Amino acid sequence: MTAKPATADTPQSSREFVKAMTLTDATMLVAGSMIGSGIFIVSAEISRTVISPFWLLMAWVVSGVVTIFGALAYGELAAMYPRAGGQYVFLRESMGHLMGFLYGWTLFVVIQTGTIAAVAVGFGKFLGVVWPSITAERFGWFPQLDFTLSGAPVQLGLSPQRLIAIISIWILTWINLRGVKEAKIVQTTLTVVKTGALAALILLGLTIGRHSEAIAANFSNGNFNPVAFTPAFVIAFGSALVGSLFASDAWNNVTFAAAEVHSPQRNLPRALIYGTGLVCLLYLLANVSYLSVLPLHGVKEGATVMERGIQYATEDRVASAVVQTVFGAAGASIMAIAILISTFGCNNGLILSGARVYYAMARDGLFFRRAGTLSKHSVPAAALIAQSIWTTLLCLTGTYGQLLNYVIFAALIFYALTTVGLFRLRKSVQSYLLPRSARSVHHSRVGNRGDPADRGTDANPGALRACDRTAWRSRLFHLAQS
């Protein structure tokens, strides 16, 4: 049933989310939240760590497998609890309010807001490629503070790039305050555009951009996998996965907005599988494209993109280097525009989704009470504003490298806990979900083995299993609604 649209006279307590997202919109939210700037950059860092074309590709394969397995688990959970809050609700129902509290506040303090800040600063950085006056140098008139945290420098202050990042966050917040219909139009449109741009980059690298020197350096004479598989390399490979996992993250955001998806029991699992499958395939093909155009190995002081290779692409902008081999100096600007579209769309999905978690927390008394109300546009306006205020502060820190490490570390912990929670939920509700008719048949089969009339299900066990599955899904749905 579609909720009635709220009006200015509708009491906040009686307002409901608007089910405005179709399967296509939900899939675009999954894909759009995943594709940011990571795929265009992090392959350089991974290459410096694994120093092998084979293991560069394997990093993306492993990240893809982990992501799709996670999507399968979350698809089942989303069908159980199609409510605003997604992963927060899953953890709360499977492990209690304390775990929900820990996840929700970690999401607010680090995971969601840290990701939004990092993507927004990436937006400012690439706008600086198109408009060189947008630099990373801090304004002298704004308060500054320099210190170290965990051995890494922290530079508090405001720069042109950080200012652009903050402006982009508040523009997207304003769009989301207008309503989910407006936000989904922006999300779906930008996701289609940037997915097309990524596909074009892949085709460019695999066709007219192919370079015989790069192919020989990466795929022949034992160059494809020159690294010995040792315990030390396993550790290094694990650290290299941080980049590919971050680039593949945020696929779970669609579950946060489950209350605004049409037929969520059917569409959420499909959107998760379609979206993650599409993006993981594109990511793998993008890296094959990179290896077809640029040699993996390079030198930091190289004068050309070929000499620098993937490892030392200028400012790690591997995709820009690939386009530059075809279009010359204009390639950097072309790729920068594509990444601007990509990061803007990515942050729209992150901003839209994250606020729904804080809304659900506030309804449980675990977040600021005001965040648990809906505006006249049926969106959690206070939660959106609180999210953007904290993200703005993160944009002033300059600690984006550390933020990304914290984001992945925290996210992986809660991904694992949520998967464990799925099995706990299966076990805890199994006795409730087993249909009464199946129990009766089961007892009849055990207690009346001698009566042929009571052995019908033994003769056709498939009928009982089909009955069990149908009743399981029906009761699961009603349990989730209770």
Image (cartoon, rainbow, N blue to C red):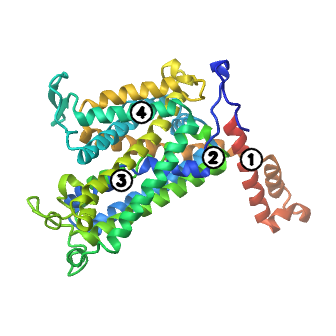
Q: Amino acid at mark 4?
A: Ile
Mark 2 neighbour density, 10 Å: few (under 14) some (14–19) many (20 or more): many
Q: Residue at x 33, y 32 (%)?
A: 166
**Left or right of 283 in this view: 125:** left
Rendered image: mark on residue 79: 2
Mark 3 neighbour density, 10 Å: few (under 14) some (14–19) many (20 or more): many
Distance from the alpha carbon under mark 3 to that under mark 4: 19 Å
Lower position in the chain sequence, tag 2 or tag 3: 2
Lower position in the chain sequence, tag 3 or tag 4: 4
Residue furthest toward the bottom? 221
Distance from the alpha carbon under mark 2 to that under mark 3: 35 Å
Task: Say which residue label 3 marks.
Answer: 338
Camera-nearest residue between 136 and 292? 136
Q: Secondary structure at mark 4?
A: helix
Q: Quadrant of residue 8?
A: top right
The answer to whether residue 236 of the structure is visible from this angle is no
